[in-house]
């Protein structure tokens, strides 16, 4: 049941993003396993450039592992997080599929219009878009306000420039310490160095 | 035990030449109420299973599809919509009564799907002709499954897919409930709805005698198909096998 519903959902999304078929078609018959602990799912590329959930005994051609912490950063569109995704096996295939999945968009307005008609669908979608934008803007405002409060009024958070200054100071200190250690070593070596001619004669023990 | 010239007909052992005749009698008897009974027996799930088979087939516009043991033609109808006017779907069945029902439905739906009565063990098609061959709930009724699978492989193009949708081995914890349903409730429903308890008793028995998921996977590999994989549907009550000709 789950496989049937998932496959239909994926194929519905692909039908709305028909540009993806041409990208996937060269990899027909191949499969990619997505491992986002604790969830693991394998997608297989079909001959018509569509996608389906793989069967019980499928052996994936590529594996993409995304730790949950990385997933949050990816959702937040952190570009550096993409570099930390682990890819095994056929990397060209995994990259093509990851590209398709990350660029796929759900045209919910089109789906809604089939149920309630074009005008109500547009109005609801517009309301949704505006509400989404407002929520995002309000969220950002609250985050900025709190960060300002914790940085200026009740310093719990550190400003970026303070951290940078601190890092520079630490680097300078490290360099100074290294220089000092070298000088100290040089001094110690010169103190302990005694030329052979000046060596005191040792008493022979009989 | 089956000998070289004997085979299973449900739980009974019959001569090979007799099986086709007996299967024909069963399907002749249930033809008109086949879909109604399928809906009742599977609570409508068989339609979802068939749709799922079509969605993983990879069939697109312009493809050639062979529907073996297609009977009432519901798969052919779904495939005909997928391949469009540039493609071709051929509906076949060994049983004239079942095929007649399918052919009429195709005509009523305004679909140009040729209906052809033929034996899956001797397919009247050239080598490497189809992009996809499907047999849904038909393989278990075939006398020589290995020959039929080899024939299906023969008519597939390189890169073509064979899909086998068939009853299979249910998830172990559910087996007792499933047995009670199959051998008590199923013949009773057959008696009440189709006035034919015996035919439905055979359907239940033939399901038990059919190879399980792994055995069928091996049979498909032996027939020359590659990358064979299967999906368990409804906890293994039904399995969809897919293999490629390479």
Image: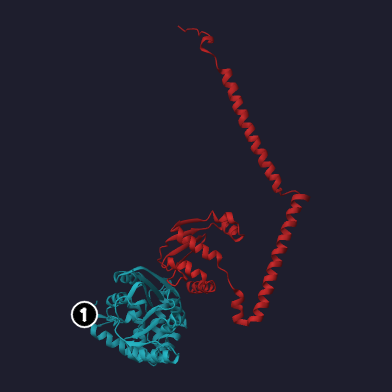
Chain colours: A red, B cyan
Q: Is residue B85 left or right of residue A38?
A: left
Q: Quadrant of residue B154?
A: bottom left
Q: Is residue B175 left or right of residue A126?
A: left
Residue B171 visible from this viewpoint: no
Q: Name the residue nearer the viewer: A146 or A206.
A: A146
Give me the residue at 35% from left, 69% from top. B214
Q: Quadrant of residue B224?
A: bottom left
Q: Which chain hosts label 1? A: B
Tell which residue pokes out farthest to the left in this image. Answer: B4
Which corner quadrant holds the C terminus of chain B?
Answer: bottom left
Picture coordinates of residue A179, whole percent (x, y): 62, 30
Element under label 1? loop
Relative height, residue A11 to residue B36 (above, below): above
Q: Name the residue nearer the viewer: B3 or A51.
A: A51
Q: Name the residue nearer the viewer: B72 or B3.
A: B72
Give me the residue at 56% from left, 58% from top. A68
Relative height, residue B86 to residue A162 (above, below): below
Q: Quadrant of residue B88?
A: bottom left
Relative height, residue B84 to residue A136 (above, below): below
Relative height, residue A28 to residue B209 (above, below): above
Tell which residue pokes out farthest to the front in this image. Answer: B86
Picture coordinates of residue A166, whole percent (x, y): 68, 41
């Amino acid at each position: 049941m789950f496989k049937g519903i998932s496959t239909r959902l994926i194929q519905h999304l692909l039908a709305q993003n028909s540009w993806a078929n041409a990208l996937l078609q060269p990899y027909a018959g191949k499969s990619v396993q997505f491992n986002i602990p604790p969830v693991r799912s394998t997608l297989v590329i079909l001959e018509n450039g569509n996608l389906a959930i793989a069967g019980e005994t499928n052996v994936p051609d590529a594996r993409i592992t995304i730790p949950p912490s990385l997933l949050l950063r990816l959702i937040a569109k952190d570009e550096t997080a993409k570099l930390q995704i682990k890819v095994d096996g056929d990397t060209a295939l995994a990259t093509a599929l990851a590209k398709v999945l990350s660029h796929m968009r759900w045209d919910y307005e089109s789906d809604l219009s089939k149920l309630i008609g074009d005008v109500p669908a547009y109005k609801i979608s517009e309301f949704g878009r505006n509400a989404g934008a407002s929520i995002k803007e309000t969220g950002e405002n609250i985050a900025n306000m709190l960060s300002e409060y914790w940085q200026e009024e009740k310093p719990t958070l550190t400003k970026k420039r303070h951290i940078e200054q601190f890092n520079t100071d630490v680097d300078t200190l490290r360099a100074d310490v290294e220089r000092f250690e070298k000088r100290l070593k040089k001094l110690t070596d010169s103190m302990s160095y005694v030329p052979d001619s000046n060596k005191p004669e040792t008493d022979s023990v009989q | 035990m089956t000998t070289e010239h004997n085979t299973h007909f449900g739980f009974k052992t019959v001569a090979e030449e007799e099986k086709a005749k007996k299967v024909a009698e069963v399907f002749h008897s249930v033809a008109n109420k086949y879909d109604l009974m399928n809906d009742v027996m599977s609570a409508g799930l068989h339609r979802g299973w068939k749709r799922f088979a079509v969605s993983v087939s990879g069939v697109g516009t312009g493809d050639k599809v062979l529907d073996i043991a297609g009977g009432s033609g519901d798969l052919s109808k779904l495939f005909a919509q997928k391949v469009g006017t540039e493609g071709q779907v051929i509906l076949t069945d060994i049983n004239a009564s079942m095929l007649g029902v399918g052919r009429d439905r195709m005509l009523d739906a305004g679909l140009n799907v040729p209906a052809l009565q033929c034996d899956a063990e001797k397919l009247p098609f050239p080598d490497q002709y189809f992009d996809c061959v499907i047999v849904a709930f038909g393989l278990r009724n075939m006398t020589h499954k290995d020959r039929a699978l080899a024939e299906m492989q023969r008519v597939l193009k390189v890169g073509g897919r064979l899909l086998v949708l068939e009853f299979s081995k249910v998830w172990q914890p559910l087996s007792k409930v499933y047995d009670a349903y199959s051998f008590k409730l199923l013949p009773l429903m057959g008696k009440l709805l189709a006035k034919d308890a015996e035919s439905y008793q055979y359907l239940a028995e033939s399901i038990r005698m059919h190879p399980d998921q792994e055995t069928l996977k091996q049979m498909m590999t032996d027939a020359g198909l590659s990358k064979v994989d299967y999906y368990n549907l409804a906890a293994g009550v039904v399995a969809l096998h897919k293999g490629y000709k390479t």
